[in-house]
Amino acid sequence: MTRCVCTARGNGKRYDEAFKIETVMYISENHKSVAQVAREVGVNENTLHGWMKKYGQQSEIKAVQSFSSSEAVLRALQKEIRDLKEENEILKKAMHYFVKSPR
């Protein structure tokens, strides 16, 4: 994980959007506590909680998310297969319904 390039602004620091998103993804992907990551990256724990609240559930992050390991890729592909199988089952049931019902 890369460190942020931040600028001093008054008493606090200002972090760029990419660093915030990357940090939230790092917490989620590695199943680490916010406190532990706060110590690792040198950001206040409350600040990270705010980032988690803001960025943690955004679909854009999930779409931009890069896989850090082959295991993560495998999990994502397995989930996609499950979703596609479920969609196929729904479509099969719909097809049988429409074939049976007279018009």
Image (cartoon, grey):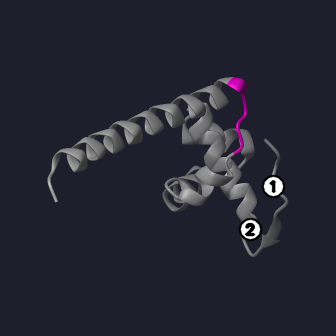
Nearer to the camera, 88 or 55: 88
Q: Is residue 67 magenta?
A: yes
- What's the amino acid at mark 2? Arg
Instruction: State if disc 2 and disc 1 touch (CB < 8 Å).
Output: no
Within the image, what quadrant is residue 102 found in? bottom left
In 3D space, how far apart are the residues under numbered discs 1 and 2 (Cα atoms)?
9 Å
Residue at the extreme top of the image, as rendered: 71
84 above or below 11?
A: above
Nearer to the camera, 91 or 65: 91
Dot 1: what SS?
A: loop
User: Residue at the spot x=58%, y=34% of the render?
Assistant: 76
The numbered mark, 1 or 2, whose residue comes first in the sequence reads: 1
Q: Is residue 22 magenta?
A: no
Magenta-drawn segment:
66-70
- What's the amino acid at mark 1? Cys
User: Residue at the spot x=66%, y=31% of the render?
Assistant: 73
* Label of residue 29 in the image: none
Q: Which residue is mark 1?
A: 4
Q: Position of residue 64 (x, y in %)?
A: 68, 53
Dot 2: what SS?
A: strand
Q: Which residue is mark 2?
A: 14
Nearer to the camera, 18 or 41: 18
Nearer to the camera, 85 or 58: 85
